[in-house]
Image (cartoon, rainbow, N blue to C red):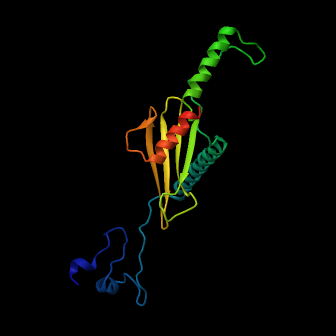
Amino acid sequence: MGPGVAGLGVAGLGWAGLGPEGARRGGWPSGSLAAIRLPTVPFDPTTLSWLVIVALVLSAVAAGVAWAAVSRQQRRPSGPARPASRPKLLGRSKADPLTAEQATREIEALQLDVATSLRHLAVVRYDAFGDMGGHLSWSMALLDDRGDGVVLTSIHGRSDSRTYAKNVSGWSATQQLSPEEEEAIGFARRAS
């Protein structure tokens, strides 16, 4: 080993040199793998005490924030949020009766909410392959009043199952539909 390898430590920081030359200089005792002297920290005990206190306070704040986030997540409802398209009747308590105009606005808002909900549902079960029985394959249409939504299809085979989703807009899809998917859309359209 050359002279540049023996002094792997940084001069002035107290790191022990490694290699045979470092061992001869007393860098590490014989028989041990390596002795490393850590650099000394130029802080007095009071400064170190303050640093420890600050670190503990920051840890407590982080734990409090994490606990608050977890408890907020547990209180949140798991379902999808209700759309905010419905106008609120301000200044009205539950005991006050609705006027005819307010009732008409409320009914129109409810009709808008219902029109965009996926309330047309149909499932068609079938055997995708001739050698399979039990009607384990299926196509399901989930559509709103305008015929917008999705068709989900699951094809069950002997060794695997495949699931497909196709967008539907205006009671028809941009992708080619199987006869069972078209049948599911037809059933959903008639199920109004």
Residue at the spot x=57%, y=39% of the render? 121
How far across and how far down the image is residue 103, in percent?
67, 14
- Number of marks: 0
Image x and y of residue 34, in percent: 40, 82
Give the camera-side residue of 114 and 31: 114
Name the one closer to the observer, 102 or 89.
Answer: 102
Q: Is residue 60 left or right of residue 27?
A: right
On screen, 115 above or below 33?
above
- The spot of residue 158 in percent (x, y) is 49, 67
Q: Is residue 88 visible?
A: no
Instruction: Tell me which corner region of the image, top left, top right, bottom left or bottom right, holds residue 32.
Output: bottom left
- In the figure, 183 relative to 147: above or below? below
Quarter that holds the N terminus: bottom left
Res. 30 visible in picture: yes
Q: Is residue 29 above or below residue 112?
A: below
Q: Nearer the viewer, residue 145 or 108?
A: 145
Residue that extends furthest to the front in the rendered view of this protein:
130
Question: Taking 168 as reference, is 138 above or below it?
Answer: below
| Residue drawn 43% across the image and 70% down it | 38
Q: Residue furthest right?
A: 95
Q: Is residue 51 left or right of residue 169?
A: right
Say which residue appears at 68% left-offset and 9% top-offset. 100
Q: Which quadrant of the rendered structure holds the C terminus?
A: top right
How far across and down, in percent of the image, does residue 47 sit? Answer: 52, 54
Q: Nearer the viewer, residue 156 or 111?
A: 156
